[in-house]
Image (spheres, rainbow, N blue to C red):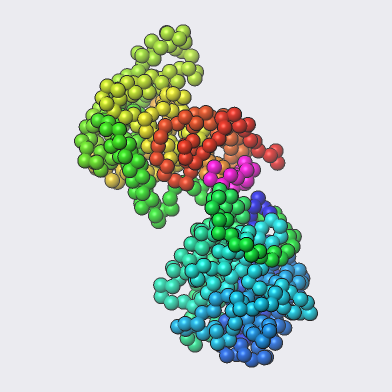
Amino acid sequence: MNNGFVRIAAAIPELRVADCSFNVSKMSDLIHQAEEEKVQVICFPELSVTAYTCADLFHQNKLLDEALKALNELQMISFSTSAAIIVGLPLRLQNQLFNTAVVLQGGQILGVVPKTHLPNQNEYYEKRWFSSGANCTATSIFISGKEVPFGTDLLFSDGKFSFGIEICEDLWMPIPPSSFQVLQGAEIIFNLSASNELIGKHPYRRQLIEQQSARCNAGYVYASAGAGESTTDMVFTGNGIIAENGKIISESERFSFNSQLIVNEIDVERLVSERVRNTNFNNQKLSNDYRVIRIEDARFSQFNLVRKFDKHPFVPPIDNRDNSCNEIFSIQVGGLAKRWQHTHAKTLLVGISGGLDSTLALLVCVKTADKLGYDRKNILGITMPGFGTTDRTYNNAINLMKSLGITIHEIPIKEASMQHFKDIQHVENIHDITYENTQARERTQILMDMANKHNGLVIGTGDLSELALGWATYNGDHMSMYAVNSGIPKTLVRYLVGWAAQQFEKSSEEILQDIINTPVSPELLPADENGEISQKTEDLVGPYELHDFFLYYFVRFGFSPDKILMLAKIAFTESYSEEIIRKWLKVFLKRFFAQQFKRSCMPDGPKVGSINLSPRGDWRMPSDAVSWGLEDS
């Protein structure tokens, strides 16, 4: 597979009711289109060969015979293509008629799956014509001169991925057949459907697909009958939906009269990763085995992905950003509130630099005080100007604290740092790591000692991205008594502060906006000749949007460096060259492995998203592990 991706398609053909020849011609067009687009599995709607709305015509021998002829024609078409093709048609077996899905590939009929659950209520009356696959004892069917596997216990696999099939109503059941199929190893489920349209039904249908794909940690490909069906009593709109693990990634145009082919990729490697991590996934696996039918490898295993990837996977979608930011902020406040109450501390202490991280930590502290009904004066904001502090960040720090009504302390660290340089015999003009870390540890010492003096808790300001890179001074800003930002990556910090700017006093809004626009910097080196920040973090360790992208796919799904590189090239194609992405990915890997010792003893802090690097939570890693690299290709 192409780094774990399988290219699949949901096909919605034009059709005519009971006109198998016409229907097959339109299906053939989509099959050839799918071949051009290097699709590995293509799925058509329920009873797509005959049309779903044939009603009592299903009892006519002519229609059933024409359906078989059409199947033979599709079988011949499959000789010239490499994809596995899933089509729907009625088939007779043991004096019963079944609504089936037939899988073809390379001129062969590989297997037939009958529908299990037949709707027989309201506008549906399938039991008038069809029998349930659950009531059939046959394990094979003689078709096109060959004995072919038949049953609800079939899976299809090329050895790299497996798929199962369910048909329409199966999805709407309390326990869909796909629930059992995934426990037997299916990573992708194909649903051939003929679901009519009713007001309010479409969003409910989408939720079902999203939820089933999430519950099963699976890809779900849904192909439903289109506008060519009879509108005697029902209207069909042609729903083609592709979902992966709870998220819809592609969708057709509804109410279209034209044939449609919806193509995308399912990341099987990602799905398997989710299942492996969830050790309960197989707890309900039944003893009865499924028969696995071998499908052939597609003749093209390499292709350029059509799938898009969000550059900022930690940042909530725009249409839900307000709710998500409120939720995240509430989690931070809830965690800090519990710790404040439990310790009976009188005060909270925050080192305020005028940067994004300390600003977010301060805002969380203020909201926590408000929630608990405590006086904001119990929050001690301490600004500690040093050799690199600029007027911009200093003024923002002071003005923000004033606008929020907290207690302000200013304790410069230059003199104490100079004394320390003298004590350890360090030349003050050498601006090396000793020069920088002296200041960071001096600030932490002040915060800790002030916490002792004022019966307080030191609130950490470092974020998840800094923990991943080890961009913190060990036993300096690395240490606190509760780290409220430890679950928030840098790309999300900026959005949270921007959101919070709308939630606080108007007097704070303008200050917060300027803080958002200030370059990220620890300000441990002297300012430039213009008094501006000279030490910009992203110039040293690389863009945080890249590192957060690397972090998400490395920790969340365990992807290899080479796969992460491939995804990053797609996501950032308009922002960074491959050379730049490769450079910073190497930096990320080197620092992530080398700096584990800092994460192994990090302070408590609330888990906010799906990724956390706390040794007590999501991430347990030896500090002596050897760093991984990239392939030379």
| Residue furthest front in the image | 287
Where is residue 457? Give x, y as percent: 32, 29
Q: Residue at image x 22%, y 32%?
A: 377
Where is residue 153? Give x, y as percent: 64, 69
**Left or right of 360, for residue 161:** right
Q: Residue at image x 46%, y 24%?
A: 474
**Taking the image as drawn, is residue 519 in sight?**
no
**Left or right of 292, for residue 340:** left
| Position above or below: 110 against 413 | below
| Position above or below: 182 against 509 | below
Residue 531 painted magenta = no
**Taking the image as drawn, is residue 606 in sight?**
yes
Q: Residue at image x 43%, y 18%?
A: 438
Toward the viewer: 152 or 247?
152
Which quarter shows the C terminus?
top right
In which quadrant of the rendered view does residue 32 lie? bottom right
Total numbered labels: 0
Q: Residue at image x 48%, y 66%?
A: 208
In which quadrant of the rendered view does residue 354 lie? top left
Toward the viewer: 515 or 174?
174
Toward the viewer: 618 or 357?
618
State which region is magenta: 555-572
Where is residue 59? Give x, y as percent: 62, 90
| Position above or below: 424 against 581 | above
| Position above or below: 11 against 282 | below
Residue 560 painted magenta = yes
| Residue furthest right in the image | 145
In which quadrant of the rendered view does residue 357 lie? top left
Which quarter shows the N terminus?
bottom right
**Left or right of 238, for residue 100:** right
Main SS of residues in magenta:
helix
Where is residue 620? Give x, y as percent: 53, 37
